[in-house]
Amino acid sequence: MGTTAGRMRPVMVAVDGSGDGLRALRYAVQEATRLDSVLRIVHVQQQMVLMAPMMPLVPDPTLHEVAAQIVKEAEAQAREFGYGRPELESVLATGPRNSALLESAADVSCVVVGRRSSPLQHLVGGSTTSSLAAHATVPVVSVPEGWRPLPPRGVVAVGLDDSDYSADVLRAAWSAARSRGARLAVVHAWRPLNEYDVAIGTRALADAWTEATRTSLVRWVRDNAPDAELEWTVLPRYETATVALHEISEAADLLVLGRHGHGRRHGPGLGLGSTVRTMLRAGDCPVMVIPS
């Protein structure tokens, strides 16, 4: 991760008083401890709450009291999770949630958010994770509902395509693996769809593609990898990207992806490729999205 004035930039975590936020906090404490970095806890106060028909809005002072309590409890939970530095930054922000979180993330090393465990919450409230991943200028880490601080698996995976952004993604994954003492698995997947798959998807073609891709991928990694020593392997997969990445996420501590998509439209999630959006929803391990 990056440094500012000779020190590690803070690790930021978004909390909301839910179990998803608590899970993100636990992961962020682990990251801040590993990086010897300051932890920044951010909560965005809800602006108004409709109680019942014909009833008044909940007044701002009450909302502020609730928000302040969420922050206070998150500070205490961070200490319980093992955060030991004396410095602990807390931000109680106001305004639109996504904009406020992006503003608070301007000088951090990464942003950690908890993936919504309830599909209904995701549909009703939209995806803060996708919006942050699409627009943040720093890496965004989505922590899935199944994540637990268990002994590490010792693998960081990175999904690469044939775009110009892949070298930056490789360097980010290389750094993440090296700082964890983990092996790096470099995944590249391709498979023709539908009728094309039926027409040309023979075993011979799959084997030929796999071997040719392995050779070119090894050469590409050697040409683009940082100088730092690291154990790494390439995994060419004759499979759709989402299937291949989901399978590797079941064996990895972290999956690193680039956020770029085919379009350049602005809006929540629209700057993300379809594969990245799928993995943010369904990845088995934490997913780190690297800005373009």
Image (cartoon, rainbow, N blue to C red):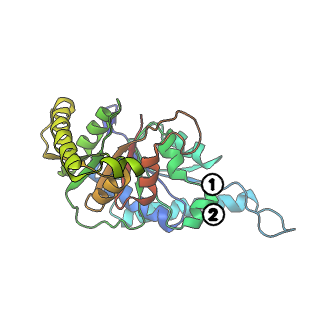
Front position among marks 1 and 2: 1
* Horizontal and vertical percent position of residue 71: 53, 59
Camera-nearest residue between 229 and 10: 229
Residue 86 percent location from the top left of the image: 36, 53
Residue at the spot 70% in from the left edge and 62% down from the top edge: 62
**Alpha-carbon neighbours of circle 1 within 10 Å: few (<14), some, or many (≥20)?**
many
Front residue of 161/114: it is 161
Q: Name above or below for residue 142 compared with residue 218.
A: below
Q: Quadrant of the C terminus?
A: top left
Q: Amino acid at mark 1?
A: Gln
Residues under numbered marks 1 and 2 in contact, where contact means CB atoms less than 8 Å apart: yes
What's the CA distance linking mark 1 and mark 2? 8 Å
**Residue 123: x and y, percent?**
60, 60
Residue at image position (25%, 51%) is 202
Q: Secondary structure at mark 2?
A: helix
| Residue 256 visible in this rendered orientation of the protein | yes
Res 45 label: 1
The disc, 1 or 2, on the residue closer to the chain's N-terminal end is: 1
Percent coordinates x, y for residue 28 in the rendering: 38, 55
Q: Is residue 69 left or right of residue 163?
A: right
